[in-house]
Amino acid sequence: MAKAAKVSASTVSRYFNHPELLKSDTRKRIDSAVRRTGYIRNRAAQTIHGIRSGTIGVLVPTLDHAIFAEVVQAFSDEVAKQGFTILLASHGYDPQREYAILRKMLEHRVDGIVLTGLDHDEAVFQLIDEQEIPTVLMWNYSQTARYPCVGTDNELAGELIAKHVLDLGHRDIACMLPPVIGNDRANARHTGVMRTLNAAGISVCPEWQLTTVYSISASKRDTIDLLSKDIRPTAIICGNDILATGAIYGATAAGLSVPDDVSVTGIGDFKGASEIEPSLTTVRIPAKRIGRETGRTLASAIITPESTKSGLHCTPELLKRSSAGRLLDRSLNF
């Protein structure tokens, strides 16, 4: 390979392991030779001698929804700048499956690990500690996290959306939240919403506290059932934008208008949230920024471990759109 590119063997090694150290024209010359010869380096032999594999393991709970695709794409684009590729896997919110996948990734000698959220089985943490592998926790944020984390304070996100609904004058409020088991993001949002409502003297009745799986069809069905009762809420706070989208569809199917008859809010600002009708009032979780900053933090920990970055809080932002209206405005239609 070195002969074909007319460079030294050490320069070829730097091209694969530390491309940022080479001049642009040198990288282009080696890249041209690699493509021309079809050269593939022997990763197995390199990892035996402690040379980086150039891969990062990324574990997410699901690949079914756009929000995780958005954050993973931003992460992948960022680490690619440092010559890394990713091994991506989903564990379906199953802690035992997450542990098994992590073991396989470590067997493949990945250089770093990204886990989604802060709460994981202790066996996962022990495995990471034993292997002493650079790790970043993505999506949720806490100052007391076990490893560097990049994400949003999801309790604050819950507080922001609950306070906004209260400020609009609503007091008959339902909450539609995803299952919290194995999902510290959902649990934190639930805590933030309920604490804010309780502080305002609002007690959500049990039949208005809905646990709905991460599905538009499920949230639509649960909303139709909720709004078919003789006494119905004037607002529905949803734990994410997927549930909120289904809730808007459900309200329409029940013959009601959003927000004139019932206000609906989400959390996330997922792709398309501003385009649905009515546009969704939500709290933005900056997925792309979280992905980029996670990539920078982990790449730095791998390349220059002595300068490892601490965590980063990507602040949530309330976005007031059309799906939530003042109670007074709504009542004028009666």
Image (tube, rainbow, N blue to C red):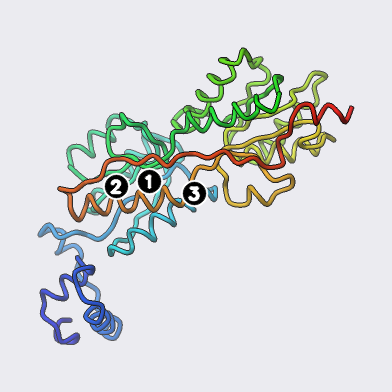
Q: SS class of the residue under badge 3?
A: loop
> Which of labels 3 and 2 is toward the front?
2
- Left of 285 or right of it: where is 258? right
Residue at position x 72%, y 42% in the image? 322
Q: Residues within 10 Å of mark 1 (few under 14, many from 20)?
A: many
Pointer 1 residue: 59
Residue 223 lies, in percent from the top left, at 72, 31
Q: Quadrant of residue 199?
A: top right
Looking at the rendered image, the quarter that the N terminus falls into is bottom left
Residue 66 lies, in percent from the top left, at 54, 50
Q: CA distance from mark 1 to mark 3?
A: 10 Å
Does residue 171 lie above or below 273 as drawn? above
Do the CB atoms of the residues marked 1 and 2 lie less than 8 Å apart? yes
Q: Mark 2: which amino acid? A: Ile
Pointer 2 residue: 113
Pointer 3 residue: 63
Q: SS class of the residue under badge 2?
A: strand
Q: Nearer the viewer, residue 232 or 34?
A: 232
Residue 245 lies, in percent from the top left, at 67, 41
- Residue 82 numbered mark, or none: none
Sequence-earlier tag: 3 or 2: 3
Q: Mark 1: which amino acid? A: Leu
Residue at position x 71%, y 28% in the image? 235
Q: Quadrant of residue 334?
A: top right
